[in-house]
Image (cartoon, grey):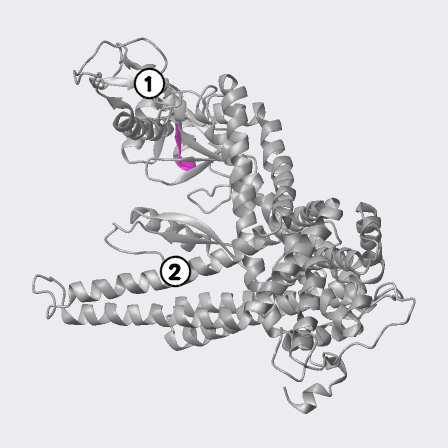
Amino acid sequence: MSDSDKSHPDNKKLDPPPADFKGPGEDRGCTDVLCSILLIASWVLTTGVGLASMGMLPQEVDPVTNTSTAFGIIKEGEPARLTNGMDYKGNICGITDYETATGENTKDLTKAFYLPSGAPVCVASCPTEDDYSSYICKYDIQQLLIEEDDDDLKSAMGGAYTTTMECAPEVETADAWGYCVPQAAIDALMSKAAEEANKMMNKQCMTTNPEDDDGNVNKPIEATDNEWVERVDGWEGNLEGKYWKNITAPINCKAQIYGGVSADYLNPQSEDGFFDRANADMYTASNVIVGAGCGVALFLGFVYLYILRIPGVLSTVCWGLIALIEVCLLGVGYFAYNNSVDWDPEQNSESERSAEEAAVMLYVAYAFAGVGAIWVCVICCLRKRIILAIGIVKEACKAVARMPIITAYPVFQVIGAVLFLIPWTVYMTYLASAGDVVVDCVCPSSSSFDMSSYMSDTSDADAAAQQQQDCEAGGCFLYKSFTYDDNTKLVALYMLFSWFWTSQFIVAAGQLVVAMSISTWYFTRDKSSVGNHTFFSSMKKAMWYHLGTAAFGSLIIAIIKTIRAVVAYLQNQAKNSKNKVLQAVLCAIQCYMWCLEKCMKFLNKNAYIQTAIFGYSFCTAARKAFFLILRNILRISAVAIVSSFVLIIGKLFITIAATAAGYYYLNTQMADELNGLWCPLLLILLFAYVTAEMFNEVFGMAIWTILQCFVADEEMFEDASMRFAEGDLAETVSKTQKAAKEQGAVVVPAMSGVGPQTSGPELE
């Protein structure tokens, strides 16, 4: 680092504290208040945009287009426009004000019924039973049938028009999100799915009788749950053999004894089918799902912290994983080298590989050997920092264990995000439905011609009708899409920015609270006085003084994310235009912005820690965090390696152990009450994984906070006895000073922040 860099005011060691020092950041003031005001203003504007899109604000009517907008910018939306079907004339069922030939208005016809041609018509309700004497037709033909008094002639007309695919008999349908889906189609799909499921089950479940101890096959069968049982009569498929009776056999082979899987079992509407049973299992085991997935998982997190604090465990794990990585690198290199020798035609005349393939494999072997050598060099350079990092992780374990309530804080973050996301999603749905509906024509890939670009916007009703008729005549279908004006696009971009800012603000606020809690623990002499009350006190301080700093840092991330969203949109446009040069440029920009986002998130996290410790505003905290990273790059690298190992192992341990505990309880205590174990176990796995993620988020932030607290501690106190470091951290400092004295070095204050410096060799 240059002398000019060293002279930077933010790149100097901390001044010694006063004698009555009780920890940095005691005298705090509100930071970055302007950003807090801007964030609140953005929420107000987001609410205004949402209410305007819902039509709850005064509307202005454009006399030219006859459309109403709020403030002349935001159109009123209707979510049903997104979900409801569209008839063959381009009218959205239940939305468009169009009077059909039958005298009905499509605003009152909310369901879409598909004719054999694939052209839908709007109907008031979906048919619930088969009636082949009644027909649903295109509107003009439907009027002809209504006007015909002779029932026999009416039926004959309906049948005739059915052959031209302009009518369809009323068949039983299921109402699926406003679309009338024929029940026969559902049954056929479920039947095919059941057939495939039974084939798989037959393959795994059917077997022959095992041999007895004397080697005789087809020994007598004993009728117990753990023995083989014969197939019962009535099983379709004419499959001979024996089946597992025990419910723990693969895929619950007991189902085969009762006739296999049926189409009704897989039907979502079946009252005793697969989905109904899955829902019943989730309800029955709900307490176990929440208890094992959340409660047990959180308990296992603290068990994991306790295990890490056992002397020798963390060191063994870290150094063992480091050694394992080296073994894997060298092992792959050795395997590649052996393959290159076996593949080389000059050394192995029986080889079917070419000399070029053998050479490539040899280069792969050299590459992995080189990476292995680099890994050894890196570890040798970081060995003492890794020892320090292990001590930091142990201290983080102690800090989190003293304030167990801190691990529940992410739950409040999730609640806050959901509380914002619910209205935001409603607003965005209305905004998305405020676009102009465009009717297009799409053709199946098997069609001999493509009319997808045939439809065009036209105000001529006759021309539009002709286009629709030509589209259908070509074996194609109408579909709706939405176009948006520039104002709507800009409003949508702002709403996306609002979500980015709010979500990142929630994350930043959580990091601040955790950092302040952990730093308070570190700079307390009597650690026994720290508890859950310390967390609540720290949360109060963070919320009162530093939410503006969280808003500032999250604003930067939100801006970067918004730029990335715009670039992604431009990438999609460039892909459609097939401009390769533009695609390459935009891809490079996207990669740069991704890297910038990752770097800023890392810098922000360290800046929040500086704010938590010293009460700095964001800009000052970011500068000091940046120079701290530069001064302690080797320490940070070591902490990154060790913390990654610890967090990954912790995530796997918590998730797998919680799921195993849930399985054991369900299998031993509730097996008779459940139709199957897989659905509750899947939910337990999901809940445990989320709990482990939240636990790791807090634990990881605690590790980085302890690191910065330790650096501040050693810079402020030249006398090690005055420092707040305890346990492994204090032992690390003592070893460093002892080694310095043995080498005759003079210990001087750490101007570079990498620990006590000496005039002799590097000791840390």
Q: Quadrant of residue 61?
A: bottom right
Q: Quadrant of the C terminus?
A: bottom right
Which residue of the protein is positioned furthest toward the right in this rendering?
Answer: 20
Dot 1: what SS?
Answer: helix
Q: Residue at x 40, y 26 (%)?
A: 266
Q: Which residue is mark 2?
A: 327
Please provide percent x and percent y for residue 424. Answer: 66, 51
Closest to the camera, between mark 1 and mark 2, is 2
Mark 2 neighbour class, 10 Å CA radius: few under 14, some 14 to 19, many 20 or more: few
Please provide percent x and percent y for residue 518. Answer: 75, 56
The residue range painted magenta reads 135-140
**Which amino acid is tagged 1?**
Asp
Mark 1 and mark 2 lie on one chain; the one further toward the N terminus is: 1
Q: Which residue is mark 1?
A: 152
Q: Residue at x 75, y 68 (%)?
A: 610
Q: Quadrant of the N terminus?
A: bottom right
**Magenta stretch holds residue 43:** no
